[in-house]
């Protein structure tokens, strides 16, 4: 659980760094990652440029689908080009994450989702914390070599600097220096294509309503208390008193225990859990941007 959380935030962390954070041996970490790959829980170690550099808009649309088979939606969404995530919860409740080139694409995209997924009354959230993005430093820019490094890493972010150097025709020292700069300045996102539903664990989306005008820094501190069970959370600039959090547990009893504990935190008005049954991760125009 913690291992996946670390790789979601930075998929280039070395086995030694991961071992230190997890208090395990390097061999044990290597074996666990291999097992996650073999089980299909991790399907790609990804690298892409930070969407904020492109002034892209991250949105999350969710609601009750009236489609006859929501599983058949996956193929349509895979070919869309802007959708990076599609998940199916209980009672045909679905979640769709997308990167739009600009806010002008929002109306058309919402209309597309409503028609294809038969969502009569979707909730549309403009995510203010797209995970695992870091805010790029002001004025920080990518060079031609940076684009080539990201492109070399896009399908395997754990490639060695030597492999990348040989692929793009520069020195390993240059690759290491440019890559460290991109990481430190928040110009690159290093993550994983993550399919936790393949495991026997339970993945739950928590619909969390906040008390009005709750300090968001307080919310972050409270949710951090529940790490690593709460893997990530999304806040929305257009829905300020609402959060979606992804919860990872071993049993339904743990889900209920977490729900009750969160409701006792005094800053939330309600916690509504929805069990996820399956999910899909897609490449988008952002992943293909560096190919140019």
Image (cartoon, helix red, strand yellow):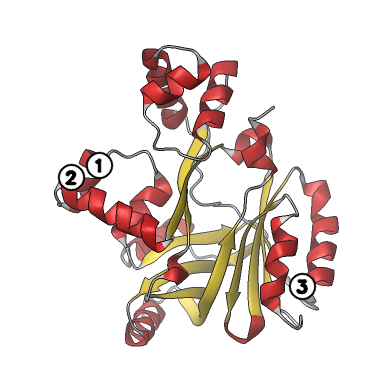
Q: Quadrant of residue 37?
A: bottom left
What SS does tag 3 mark? Answer: helix
Mark 1 closeness class: few <14, some 14–19, many ≥20 residues within 10 Å: some
| Residue carrying label 2 | 26
Mark 3 closeness class: few <14, some 14–19, many ≥20 residues within 10 Å: many
x, y percent for residue 136: 53, 33
Q: Is residue 210 visible?
A: no
The residue that appears at 84% across and 57% down in the rendered structure is 107
What SS does tag 2 mark? Answer: helix
* Above or below for 181 versus 108: above
Mark 2 closeness class: few <14, some 14–19, many ≥20 residues within 10 Å: some
First of labels 3, 2 by sequence position: 2
The residue that appears at 15% across and 52% down in the rendered structure is 24
- Do labels 2 and 1 touch, CB within 8 Å? yes
| Residue carrying label 1 | 15
On the rendered image, what quadrant is the C terminus found in? top right
On the rendered image, what quadrant is the N terminus found in? bottom left
Mark 3 vs mark 2: give the one in front.
2
* CA distance separating discs 2 and 1: 6 Å
x, y percent for residue 162: 37, 21
Q: Is residue 234 visible?
A: yes
What SS does tag 1 mark? Answer: helix
First of labels 1, 3 by sequence position: 1
Q: Nearer the viewer, residue 20 or 281?
A: 281
| Residue carrying label 3 | 117
Q: Nearer the viewer, residue 66 or 76?
A: 76
Q: Is residue 272 left or right of residue 282?
A: left
* Above or below for 261 versus 25: below
The residue that appears at 39% across and 66% down in the rendered structure is 230
x, y percent for residue 173: 36, 14
Q: Quadrant of residue 69?
A: bottom right
Could you tell me how many numbered marks the image carries? 3
């Amino acid at each position: 659980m913690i291992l996946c959380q670390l790789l979601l935030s930075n998929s280039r962390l070395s086995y030694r760094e991961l071992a230190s954070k997890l208090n395990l041996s390097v061999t044990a970490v290597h074996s666990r990652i291999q097992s996650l790959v073999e089980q299909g829980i991790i399907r790609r170690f990804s690298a892409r440029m930070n969407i904020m550099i492109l002034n892209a808009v991250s949105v999350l649309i969710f609601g009750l689908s009236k489609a006859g088979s929501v599983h058949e939606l996956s193929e349509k969404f895979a070919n869309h080009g802007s959708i990076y995530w599609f998940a199916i919860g209980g009672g045909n409740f679905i979640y769709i994450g997308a990167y739009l080139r600009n806010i002008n694409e929002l109306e058309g995209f919402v209309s597309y989702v409503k028609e294809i997924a038969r969502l009569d009354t979707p909730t549309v959230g403009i995510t203010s914390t797209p995970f695992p993005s870091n805010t790029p430093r002001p004025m920080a820019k990518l060079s031609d070599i940076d684009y080539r490094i990201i492109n070399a890493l896009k399908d395997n972010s754990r490639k060695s600097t030597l492999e990348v150097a040989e692929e793009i025709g520069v020195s390993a020292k240059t690759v290491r220096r440019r890559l460290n700069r991109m990481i430190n300045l928040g110009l690159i996102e290093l993550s994983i294509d993550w399919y936790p539903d393949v495991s026997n664990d339970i993945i739950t989306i928590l619909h969390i309503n906040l008390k009005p005008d709750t300090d968001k820094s307080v919310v972050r501190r409270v949710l951090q208390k529940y790490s690593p069970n709460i893997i990530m959370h999304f806040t929305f600039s257009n829905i300020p008193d609402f959060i979606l959090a992804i919860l990872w547990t071993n049993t339904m009893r743990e889900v209920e225990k977490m729900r009750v504990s969160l409701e006792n935190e005094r800053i939330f008005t309600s916690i509504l859990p929805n069990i996820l049954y399956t999910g899909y991760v897609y490449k988008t125009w952002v992943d293909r941007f560096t190919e140019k």
